[in-house]
Amino acid sequence: MNTLRIQTRDGRRTDISADTLATLTATLRGRLLTEDAPGYDAARRIWNGMIDRKPALIARCLGASDVVAAVNFAREHELLFSIRGAGHNIAGTAVADGGLMIDLIEMQGIRVDPEARRVWVQPGTTWADVDRETQLHGLVVPGGIVSTTGVSGFTLGGGFGWLTRKWGYTVDLLRSVELVTPDGQFLNVTAESHPDLFWALCGGGGNFGVVTGYEFDAKPLGPTVMAGIVFYSFERAVDLLRHFREITGNAPNELACLFAVRTAPAAPFIPEEQHGKLIVGIAMNYAGPLDDAMRYVDQIRNFDAEPIVDLIRPQQFMEHQKFLDAGQPYGRNYYWKSDFFDRIDDELIDVAVDHWAQITSPLSSSLIMHLGGAGQARPLDSTAVGFRNTEFVFNMQSAWDGDAGSEEHIGWARAMFDAVHPYSGGSSYINFQTEDEGDERVRQSYPAEIYERLVEVKDRYDPTNMFCFNKNIQPSAAVLRRQRADTSPVSD
Ligand SMILES: Cc1cc2nc3c(=O)[nH]c(=O)nc-3n(C[C@H](O)[C@H](O)[C@H](O)COP(=O)(O)OP(=O)(O)OC[C@H]3O[C@@H](n4cnc5c(N)ncnc54)[C@H](O)[C@@H]3O)c2cc1C
């Protein structure tokens, strides 16, 4: 191995000698990949194909001791580094150009204690992996709506999905976190042992250290649930969104509904005349007895139009968790905008339908998910989840293959966001923010008092902002100034 030129946090480049790299290689149980190593190119790729960055070094960690070594190495050499859980993120903060990637994808252990209803999860896993192990025991940890999404970054942002209304945000079920801190210590963090740090890890993102393990409470579910989607012609979009508003206005916590817009794929279960046309649908999951669910299925079906296809039925929860996966495959180009709404006014409906009609790519989609329920049951400041009190999350998701049309597709999502944003109740979700949404949007993701407390925790655990390649909580300016003064040369 030759000397390696690598990016530092302050924008310089530093040379790491072959001997130093050899020492790190020998320290790690996992592999250390440079650009010329077999497997490097696959390792640097993540879910969003738009993110085409080349780290100088990838440390494929296999356990907490590898992570300690990687964090210490990054600190000692002042390196720019990124953390990758499952790499399933729109902004692509898992990969920093020219820096070090602390890659956790090979840490995929999961252990379930069915008696205690506890689940231990390593950070390279996806929700499909966790569902597989928990559903074996009729249990579930509430995850997201696409099963290939990583547990790690998801949980650190707060996390929501089909079961949020029933059991709260994913962090509401988090019981402990194994963390490697910026100074290379290994901590078992709980609400009792480190109240502020645990609080900050429940919604504050990857700002406070590298998580090497999560411990969750699990809940009983299924394995069969009443779930699925019913699609109608886009011509009925306004009425169907009003219908969705009515259903969600009276929904019990067991019922989670999602409004979906997409282009009908050429799938055998969709009539041929609809292929390639825009369709709208209501998807649902009922987290309770199948018999009770029928009442709400009937409500959803009680719409004065012939459905294009009705896929609501009793099915395995794991199957339902995967039904949106095919629309979000690995490696495609994606650009998203996302916003939160307290209610769905008629005006918002008109604006939304108008912009959906202008969708530029047949691979793009949009969704409005009903949140609330048990997610709102806890006090707003009980965790660092800044959007706890919201009712609806609204995503505008551009997707396309190849380079052609990128500007047009990105432009559609941006224009739609600009049009609906005036109706937003405020707040934002760090896990849905794109690459170009910076510090201001991160700040808007939290009420002022939550953001200030996050900064206090950052000041305490990462005052130099070593963990900066993320949706960043910056340490307070005063702390940064003091650091600079301490390190600047004394002039006489
Ligand atoms: C198709 C799709 C569907 C989604 N659906 C949902 C949904 O239903 N609900 C929802 O809440 N979110 C959803 N998300 C958003 C999801 O929560 C984020 O993309 C999340 O970052 C995914 O986690 P990851 O580990 O795969 O990400 P990564 O790209 O691996 O990580 C993203 C960032 O998280 C931080 N991070 C990750 N792991 C660690 C760690 N171990 N220690 C410290 N920091 C870490 C780092 O800053 C990292 O750069 C979805 C995303 C996609 C792409």
Image: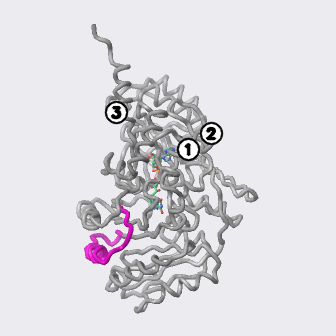
At mark 2, the secondary structure is loop
Instruction: Mark 2 and mark 3 in contact? Answer it, CB < 8 Å.
Output: no
Q: Is residue 411 magenta?
A: no
Is 257 located above or below residue 50 in the figure? below
- Residue 48 visible? The answer is no
Residue drawn 30% across and 51% down? 436
Judge from the rendering whether residue 216 lies leftward or rightward of residue 256; answer left or right. right
Real-space Cα separation, disc 2 to disc 3, in angstroms: 28 Å
Q: Residues within 10 Å of mark 1 (few under 14, many from 20)?
A: many
Of the image marks 2 and 1, the number of the one nearer the N terminus: 2
- Residue 441 visible? The answer is yes
Image position, residue 348 (x, y; %): 30, 73
Real-space Cα separation, disc 1 to disc 3, in angstroms: 23 Å
User: Where residue 198 is drawn, which disc sits there?
Assistant: 1
Image position, residue 490 (x, y; %): 32, 12
Q: Which residue is mark 3?
A: 477
> Mark 1 belongs to which amino acid?
Phe
Q: Which residues are magenta?
A: 338-365
Q: Residues within 10 Å of mark 3 (few under 14, many from 20)?
A: few
Mark 3 Cβ inside 8 Å of ligand 1: no
Q: Which residue is mark 2?
A: 193
Image position, residue 303 (x, y; %): 43, 89
> Mark 2 belongs to which amino acid?
Ser
> Looking at the image, which residue sits at the far right?
115
> Mark 3 belongs to which amino acid?
Ala
